[in-house]
Image (spheres, rainbow, N blue to C red):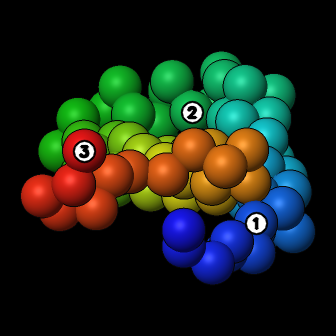
Amino acid sequence: MSKAQPRPVKEAVIWGIISLAAYLLVFLNQGAVINYFAQGGVASLALIATAIAFSLIHGTFANYFLESLGIRPLKKGGH
């Protein structure tokens, strides 16, 4: 049997708060966000950058959350 690895609960909570704050920031300012992103041009790059940032933030949170529940990917070549 393998040695039990520590669960990253603290990291899951921190990234969960960051994720929640990012979503709140966008949803509470949705009028300004929509107006800015609808301008086109350089603002369309900001839209792409925002989508990538949300993907990374939420993905990091989801990773730590699943690991804190003890759900980890299988080792390469293992069943």
What x and y, as percent, mark residue 18? Answer: 76, 57
Q: Is residue 6 above or below residue 17?
A: below
Q: Is residue 23 above or below residue 69?
A: above
For discs 2 and 3, the disc positioned in front in the rendered view: 3
For label 1, the residue is: 7
Q: Please, what is the three-letter code of the amino acid marked with disc 1? A: Arg
Distance from label 2 to label 3 (Cα)?
46 Å
Left or right of residue 44: residue 31: right
Task: Label 1, secondary structure: give it.
Answer: loop
For label 2, the residue is: 33
Left or right of residue 69: residue 41: left
Query: Looking at the image, which is closer to me, 42 or 61?
Result: 61
Task: Label 3, secondary structure: give it.
Answer: loop
Q: Earlier in the sequence, mark 2 or mark 3?
A: 2
Q: Please, what is the three-letter code of the amino acid marked with disc 3? A: His
Whether the residues at callouts 2 and 1 have beta carbons within 8 Å, the answer is no
Q: Residue 79 shows which numbered tag?
A: 3
